[in-house]
Image (cartoon, rainbow, N blue to C red):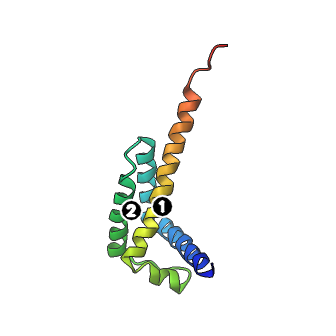
Amino acid sequence: MSLLAKLFGLTVEAVFLQLFHGVGFVAALIALVAGYFRVPSWCVPVLAVAFGFGADRLTDVAGLSGKASSATDRAAFMIFVYLAIAAVGYLAGRYIRSGLAKRKSPPTPE
């Protein structure tokens, strides 16, 4: 259980680092737009792999802890981080679209 908690904490820290550096924010916005326009859900892992490899090759992240910054040097961990970012962004976009559709529907006459 302790190992799972450490992995979760490390992942959350890496997600915030990526969002802070801007690359994660761009990935989240693209996933949000994809979810809003109902792009097929298989695009989420594709987006995660593309941004994961791109961020691994192009950015150098200095984190709050040495473990988070050393973990972001590994491509597999970056793909995992961007999978979390893309999945949350995609689901948020779908949820926003659903909420707006319910809000725009005319009331049913009784």
Q: Residue at x 38, y 74 (%)?
A: 76
Q: How many marks?
A: 2
Q: Residue at x 42, y 64 (%)?
A: 23
The type of residue carrying mark 2 is Ala
The residue pinned by badge 1 equals 85
| Snapshot quadrant of residue 83 | bottom left
Q: Which mark is residue 53?
A: none
Q: Residues within 10 Å of mark 1 (few under 14, many from 20)?
A: many
Looking at the image, which is closer to me, 12 or 1? 1
| Snapshot quadrant of residue 47 | bottom left
The residue pinned by badge 2 equals 48
Q: Are marks 1 and 2 in contact (CB under 8 Å)?
A: yes
Name the residue furthest top: 110
Q: Residues within 10 Å of mark 2 (few under 14, many from 20)?
A: many
Q: Residue at x 59, y 79 (%)?
A: 6
Split into 4 quadrants, where in the image is the N terminus? Answer: bottom right
**In the figure, is residue 46 to the left or right of 98?**
left
Question: In what element is the residue under mark 2?
Answer: helix
Q: CA distance from mark 1 to mark 2?
A: 8 Å
The type of residue carrying mark 1 is Ile
Q: Position of residue 13 (x, y in %)?
A: 55, 73
Name the residue furthest bottom: 66
Instruction: Please report whichever mark, 1 or 2, sits nearer to the chain's N-terminal start.
Output: 2
Q: Position of residue 4 (x, y in %)?
A: 58, 76
Looking at the image, which is closer to me, 13 or 109? 109
Q: Position of residue 49 (x, y in %)?
A: 35, 65
| Snapshot quadrant of residue 105 | top right
Q: Residue at x 55, y 77 (%)?
A: 7
In the rendered image, the vertical position of residue 49 relative to residue 100, given as above or below? below
